[in-house]
């Protein structure tokens, strides 16, 4: 049997441990999720039948604040996956210095096989099942793979019905009319863009001469592709779950986005209608896209995409992990030995949760910000933490991933130790 996602994620913690001087107690606490819930959600389907779905919510750690993290709808959702995603959220929130712990949720389903009404009943049923374990000061939900503002709106509404009070701050990523924040939709892509923008000058890369391939053309990958194309980068390949397209001289991203929105996927772009005439392109598989000889590779889909099996085929110089956990720890070692620099998920995709934090602050204060304010605060946070992680990696001569974990561990360790450690109790009284 292959190794569990959570134990693979834990290897990143071990790699960082030797560079921090935090108590053993703190490390021990971070090895296990604090709270894992598995619920069965009964849903009345449109044809009158009853179907039971499996749902999860995991609060990995809440020492630095209430749990925070998205809810994923996907056929592969399992407790192990949700636990590892909650682990990554814990470190991501600490990297960005957000006053949150880490959490995650999910439901095992194929969302494309359900009608909108069935999805609504399922989303409300999920909240009925977990309502006692979430809350604006306990654990705050958000969108993730195949969930969006509409789903978040149903969830926040259902929670408000149960509590008999309007509770916008229990969910982020809501529709604007229900207390959502401007800028939340494109925040993960914008955050990744700010990281690229702040670090690439250190690597002497000029946008117009930099080629980019993006795996995943969903709500993050497609927006990031457009931001990069506008800035002059040559986005030569993009893909979705059905496959991808490649053009040496660069793709016309705005047209592809438009086309994808009005059709089922990138596949529909293949030489049908106007986009094909704009630029000639070749069709490729996701595996071929990952193996392209480009400057920057951006996995923006799901976890476990670059593994021991395909790592030898990777030729990109830099990888930006916009998905959560797209590279296994074994593949990481190979990439490092090949001199390929990886910008880790817990930094590169942290823009989403950062604007979620802004949304939560706005909900609690009742004062709403402009898009300019949101973007300016997001930029400042992403640039600041990127710089710190870059310096740690240079000073200690370690990978950016290990540096990001060191940075997060220092913050987590401090918070955990403030509650008392072994030394504190053994070495006598409080003075
Ligand atoms: N699902 C996103 C992530 O993995 C956002 C989480 C949030 O906003 O709480 O970072």
Image (spheres, rainbow, N blue to C red):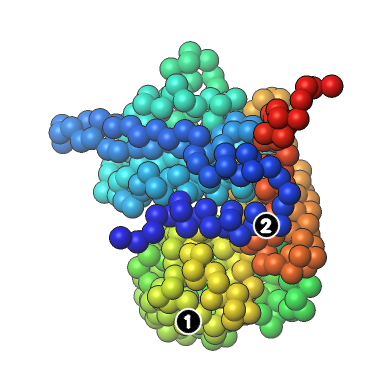
How many numbered badges does the structure rendering display? 2
- Give the percent coordinates (x, y) of residue 308: 44, 73
- Give the percent coordinates (x, y) of residue 1: 30, 60
Is 410 or 104 nearer to us in this picture? 410
Q: CA distance from mark 1 to mark 2?
A: 28 Å
Is 9 or 359 nearer to us in this picture? 9
Residue 211, by quadrant, is bottom right
The quarter in which the C terminus is drawn is: top right
Read off the residue under disc 1.
Answer: 312
Q: Is residue 85 above or below residue 134?
A: below
Q: Is residue 15 above or below residue 177?
A: below
Tag nearer the camera, 1 or 2: 2
Residue 366, by quadrant, is top right
Residue at position x 55%, y 72% in the image: 333
Q: Secondary structure at mark 2?
A: loop
Q: List the single residue furthest toward the right.
A: 431
- Give the percent coordinates (x, y) of residue 73: 38, 46
Residue at position x 50%, y 34% in the image: 34
- Give the percent coordinates (x, y) of residue 327: 50, 65
Read off the residue under disc 2.
Answer: 18
């Amino acid at each position: 049997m292959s190794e569990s996602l959570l134990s693979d994620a834990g290897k990143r913690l071990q790699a960082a441990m030797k560079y921090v001087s935090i108590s053993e107690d703190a490390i021990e606490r971070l090895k296990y999720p604090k709270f894992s819930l598995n619920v069965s959600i009964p849903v009345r389907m449109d044809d009158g039948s009853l179907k039971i779905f499996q749902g999860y919510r995991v609060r990995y750690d809440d020492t630095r604040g209430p749990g925070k993290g998205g809810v994923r709808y996907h056929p592969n959702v399992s407790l192990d996956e949700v636990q590892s995603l909650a682990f990554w959220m814990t470190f991501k929130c600490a990297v960005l210095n957000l006053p949150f712990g880490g959490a995650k949720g999910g439901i095992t389903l194929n969302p494309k096989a359900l009608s909108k009404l069935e999805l609504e009943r399922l989303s409300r049923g999920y909240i009925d099942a977990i309502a006692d374990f979430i809350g604006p000061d306990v654990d705050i939900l958000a969108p993730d793979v195949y969930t969006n503002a509409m789903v978040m709106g149903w969830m926040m509404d259902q929670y408000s019905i149960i509590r008999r009070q309007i509770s916008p701050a229990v969910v982020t990523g809501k529709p604007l009319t229900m207390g959502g924040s401007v800028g939340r939709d494109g925040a993960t892509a914008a955050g990744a863009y700010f990281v690229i923008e702040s670090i690439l000058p250190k690597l002497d890369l000029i946008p117009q001469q930099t080629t980019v391939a993006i795996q995943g053309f969903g709500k993050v990958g497609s927006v990031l592709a457009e931001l990069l194309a506008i800035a002059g980068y040559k986005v030569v390949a993009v893909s979705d779950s059905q496959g991808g397209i490649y053009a040496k001289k660069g793709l016309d991203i705005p047209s592809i986005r438009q086309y994808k929105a009005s059709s089922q996927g990138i596949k529909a772009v293949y030489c049908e209608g106007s986009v094909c005439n704009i630029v000639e392109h070749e069709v490729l598989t996701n595996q071929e896209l990952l193996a392209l000889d480009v400057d920057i590779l951006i996995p923006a889909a799901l976890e476990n995409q670059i593994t021991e099996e395909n790592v030898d085929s990777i030729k990109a110089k830099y990888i930006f992990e916009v998905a959560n956990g797209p590279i296994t720890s074994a593949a990481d070692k190979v990439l490092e030995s090949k001199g390929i620099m990886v910008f880790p998920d817990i930094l590169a995709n942290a823009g989403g949760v950062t604007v979620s934090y802004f949304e939560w602050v706005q909900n609690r204060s009742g004062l709403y910000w402009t898009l300019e304010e949101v973007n300016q605060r997001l930029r400042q946070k992403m640039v600041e933490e990127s710089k710190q992680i870059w310096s740690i990696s240079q000073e200690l001569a370690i990978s950016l991933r290990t540096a990001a974990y060191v940075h997060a561990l220092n913050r987590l360790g401090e918070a955990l130790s403030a509650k008392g450690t072994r030394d504190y109790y053994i070495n006598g009284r409080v003075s």
